[in-house]
């Protein structure tokens, strides 16, 4: 390092109010390489503005480089970066912000579109034409804003002074918290780190960051990373060499530990000006270590691992979901990370950078969430964390049981149709099932099981909020003695013609009789209480006969079917004419029941009549 105030550029992507609790440098493997933009002179102060790496270098004077570096100015240069943070173009001078003074460092706030730039702080305009090296010029921070394709001066920070330097700015993503370096009176050492907050009334008075950051030596080059890490250089805490890189969580609390040494990056030489790429998987710093091209060079750091928290939340309420299970699968199908979120809905994960994964998150009463996770793309990360929103369960679920004692029926087949596709699911050993639904759909579910008479369920999700359709589906066994009220075999008043839904139920019965050729049945039809006894008896016989004829038309032998009518003698409710009843109540009595008279198996209990 060749000057007391080396100029560095920083780029911030962090919200002051919501910084995370982990550092990018904790337990992460990394590799370090030099960059092609370096020259035999001093190149340092890397920064990122959008998709460019901006850095500082000695400018040419009269078309030549000076042999005496103290007689020339530092200017800003840039080069293009790809998504991985790799340099993909030659360096070029940034003429839009270059002045006749020393320039840098600067911090860019994407939220406000401002540049916070360190420049030579000329307090007396008459001194501008004097040779720089002959004046003890202080440094100050000025603010620029974009105007078309150029930058225009907006303001100078109110605490700039001709008595001391104010330099090395780094700004929060909201643009309201600035950290900088100064040798103003009252500090701990030669230079300290300070912060100031912007309010409606302007910038607050600078506040020293205290002994957990500042020492009796020099603290410089602050950088706020998206994971809440404040990185800076110091020669006052001891380390591998002269200036070394340290980090600490920001804001700095009473419980905070002293700044931590970044051992994997530091060398016996000066190491300073660390910044991290937007992708959080690479970064840059400057060093005058022995293997460089010039006096100071910029080095490229690739973080091989990326440590972050998966945070599970409800997509509907945005509340934290504790206990959600998370599996992360790599491209080879191997489990790269697995676990359950804690009481704060967090699960710490460590993955390889620039790699693709599949994340699967599940939680009780929520739908499974599957995310493609490309570690080269940080757009899914918020403050360095991955927020996973689970949709409240929108499902058809329940249990299929034998109606005799509600005994679970495993391996029952449910065929689910929404009019455009058909899916099949099986119940587990407890007879339970679950199927994810979609909004604005009409569903029909056919339920079947071995040695059971199946059934059908219809429902729709038209205009509904997410929720659960929870069913206890009771099936009748096909044992001898079972009496089953055929679902939907109802008749219009005074009619015996089969309705369409009744035909569908008889089709189910015909299929059962085909699959179980030993079964013999009797069809029993009923009427409501209106009409004479004689009329109702005749009507019920016609209804049974109509059902019998329909089954025969489907290929079932007449020898396997008996039929009978019971008129109004077996009502299912109290609508016997003694009390007023609705049409719907009378409708329930106009029905057909099937009794299984013969089967391979004798029913466990006889004499009971069961209805859906």
Image (cartoon, grey):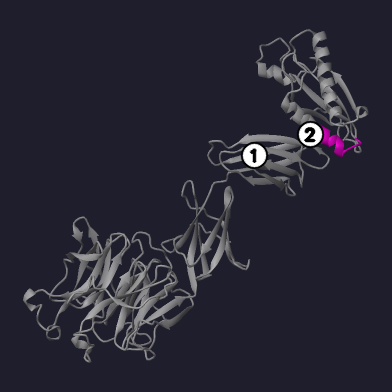
Say whether residue 315 is magenta. Answer: no
**In what element is the residue under mark 2?**
helix
Residue at image point 83% right, 12% down: 538
Q: Residues within 10 Å of mark 1 (few under 14, many from 20)?
A: few
Q: Does 76 appear above or below 481?
A: below
State left or right for residue 446 relative to residue 113.
right
User: Which residue appears farthest toward the left when viewing the image?
Assistant: 126
As measured in the structure, the alpha-carbon distance from the residue carrying label 1 to the one carrying label 2 is 20 Å
Q: Does 3 appear above or below 387?
A: below
Q: Quadrant of the N terminus?
A: bottom left
Residues shaded magenta: 509-518
Say whether residue 510 is magenta. Answer: yes
User: Which residue appears farthest toward the front when viewing the image?
Assistant: 63
Mark 1 lies on residue: 419
**In what element is the residue under mark 1?**
loop
Q: Is residue 340 visible?
A: yes
Mark 2 lies on residue: 508
Q: Quadrant of residue 360?
A: bottom right
Query: What is the x, y in percent for residue 100?
Result: 17, 77
Query: What is the x, y in percent for residue 409?
Result: 77, 43
State left or right for residue 203 relative to residue 387.
left
């Amino acid at each position: 390092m060749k000057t007391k105030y080396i100029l560095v550029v920083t780029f911030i992507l962090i919200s002051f109010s919501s910084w995370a609790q982990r550092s990018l440098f904790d337990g992460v493997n990394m590799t370090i390489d030099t960059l092609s933009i370096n020259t035999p002179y001093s190149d340092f102060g890397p920064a990122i503005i959008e998709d460019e790496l901006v850095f500082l270098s000695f400018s040419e004077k009269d078309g030549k480089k000076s042999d005496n570096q103290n007689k020339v100015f530092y200017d800003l240069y840039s080069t293009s970066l790809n998504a991985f943070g790799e340099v993909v173009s030659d360096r070029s001078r940034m003429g839009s912000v270059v002045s006749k003074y020393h320039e840098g460092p600067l911090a860019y706030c994407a939220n406000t579109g401002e540049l916070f730039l360190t420049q030579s702080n000329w307090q007396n305009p008459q001194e501008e034409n004097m040779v720089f090296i002959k004046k003890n010029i202080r440094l100050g921070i000025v603010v620029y804003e974009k105007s078309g394709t150029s930058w225009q001066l907006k303001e100078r920070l109110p605490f700039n002074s001709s008595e001391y330097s104010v330099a090395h700015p780094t700004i929060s993503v909201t643009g309201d918290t600035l950290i900088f370096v100064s040798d103003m009176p009252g500090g701990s050492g030669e230079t300290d780190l300070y912060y100031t907050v912007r309010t409606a009334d302007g910038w607050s008075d600078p506040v020293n960051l205290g002994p957990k950051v500042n020492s009796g030596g020099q603290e410089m080059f602050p950088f706020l990373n998206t994971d809440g890490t404040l990185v800076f250089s110091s020669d006052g805490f001891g380390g591998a060499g002269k200036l070394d890189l340290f980090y600490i969580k920001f804001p700095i609390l009473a419980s905070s530990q002293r700044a931590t040494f970044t051992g994997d990056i530091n060398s016996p030489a000066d190491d300073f000006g660390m910044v991290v790429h937007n992708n959080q998987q690479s970064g840059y710093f400057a060093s005058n270590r022995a293997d460089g091209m010039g006096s100071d060079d910029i080095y490229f750091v690739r973080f091989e691992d990326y440590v972050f928290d998966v945070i599970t939340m409800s997509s509907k309420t945005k509340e934290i979901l504790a206990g959600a299970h998370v599996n992360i699968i790599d491209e080879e199908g191997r489990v790269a990370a697995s676990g359950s979120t804690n009481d704060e809905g967090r699960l710490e994960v460590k993955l390889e950078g620039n790699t693709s994964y599949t994340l699967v998150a599940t939680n009780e009463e929520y739908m499974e969430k599957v995310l493609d996770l490309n570690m080269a793309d940080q757009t899914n990360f918020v403050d360095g964390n991955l927020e996973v929103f689970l949709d409240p369960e929108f499902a058809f679920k329940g249990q299929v049981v034998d109606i005799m004692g509600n005994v679970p029926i495993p391996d029952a087949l449910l065929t689910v149709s929404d009019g455009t596709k058909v899916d099949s699911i099986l119940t587990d050993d407890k007879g339970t099932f679950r199927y994810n639904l979609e909004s604005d759909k009409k569903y029909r579910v056919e339920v079947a099981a071995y040695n059971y008479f199946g059934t059908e369920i219809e429902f729709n999700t038209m205009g509904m909020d997410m929720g659960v359709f929870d069913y206890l589906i009771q099936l009748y066994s096909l044992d001898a003695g079972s009496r089953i009220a055929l679902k939907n075999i109802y008749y219009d008043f005074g009619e015996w013609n089969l309705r369409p839904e009744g035909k569908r139920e008889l089709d189910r019965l015909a299929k059962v009789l085909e699959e179980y050729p030993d079964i013999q049945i009797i069809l029993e039809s009923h009427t409501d209480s209106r009409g004479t006894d004689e009329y109702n008896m005749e009507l019920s016989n016609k209804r049974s006969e109509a059902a019998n004829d329909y089954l025969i038309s489907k290929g079932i032998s007449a020898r396997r079917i008996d039929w009978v009518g019971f008129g109004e003698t077996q009502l299912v409710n109290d609508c016997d004419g003694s009390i007023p009843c609705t049409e719907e109540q009378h409708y329930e009595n106009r029905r057909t029941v099937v009794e299984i008279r013969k089967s391979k198996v004798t029913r466990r209990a006889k004499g009971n009549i069961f209805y859906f």
